[in-house]
Amino acid sequence: NTTESPVAVETLADVPEHVLRGLPEDVRLFPSAVDKTRLGVWATKSILKGKKFGPFVGDKKKRSQV
């Protein structure tokens, strides 16, 4: 008799307002394709290489660190 604890699912209500404001027009947050309990970033059309949006909050990492 095993009991599984419920898994918390991330929702748009969990996303800080400044993050939502910083998303480009053609980017949306939907359930992740990798982890269904988390939100993922999805583009509604192609994003040109080098396109910048933000503001960025966090620590920048080099490619070798991710």
Image: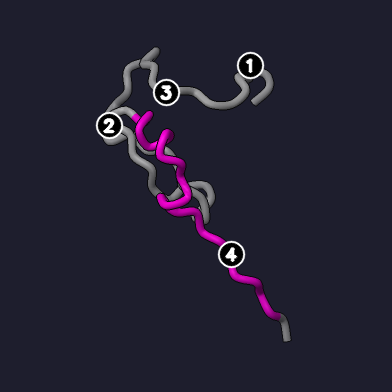
Instruction: Categorize mark 2 by other alpha carbons within 10 Å: few (<14), some (14-19), many (20+).
Output: few
How many numbered marks, from 0 up? 4
Q: Mark 3 and mark 4: span between their CA atoms?
A: 30 Å
Q: Nearer the viewer, mark 3 or mark 2?
A: 3
Whether the residues at callouts 1 and 3 have beta carbons within 8 Å, the answer is no
Residue depicted at x 35% and y 33%? 21
Which residue in the structure is indicated by mark 2?
A: 26
Amino acid type, mark 2: Asp
| Horizontal side of residue 65 vs 44, given as left or right | right
| Label located before the other in sequence (3 or 2) | 2
Tell me, yes or no, whether the two marked residues, 1 and 2, touch with CB atoms within 8 Å. no
Instruction: Tell me the residue that label 1 is attached to.
Output: 62
Q: Position of residue 52 (x, y in %)?
A: 39, 17
Mark with earlier residue (1, 2): 2
Callout 4, which amino acid?
Val
Comes first in the chain, label 1 or label 4: 4
Q: Is residue 15 above or below residue 24?
A: below
Quadrant assignment for the N terminus: bottom right
> Of the numbered discs in the image, which one, if any, rests on residue 54?
3
Q: Distance between the residues labelled 4 and 2?
A: 30 Å
The disc label shown at residue 41, or none: none
Indicate whether residue 22 is drawn in magenta: yes
Residue 41 quadrant: top left
Residue underneath mark 4: 7
Q: Residue 65, image x and y in percent?
A: 68, 22
Q: Which residue lies furthest to the right in this view?
A: 1
At numbered mark 1, what does the secondary structure look like: helix, strand or loop?
Answer: loop
Label 3 close to label 2 by CB (< 8 Å): no
- The stretch of residues the image draws in magenta is 3-23
- Closer to the camera: disc 1 or disc 3? 3
The question of residue 58 being in magenta is answered with no
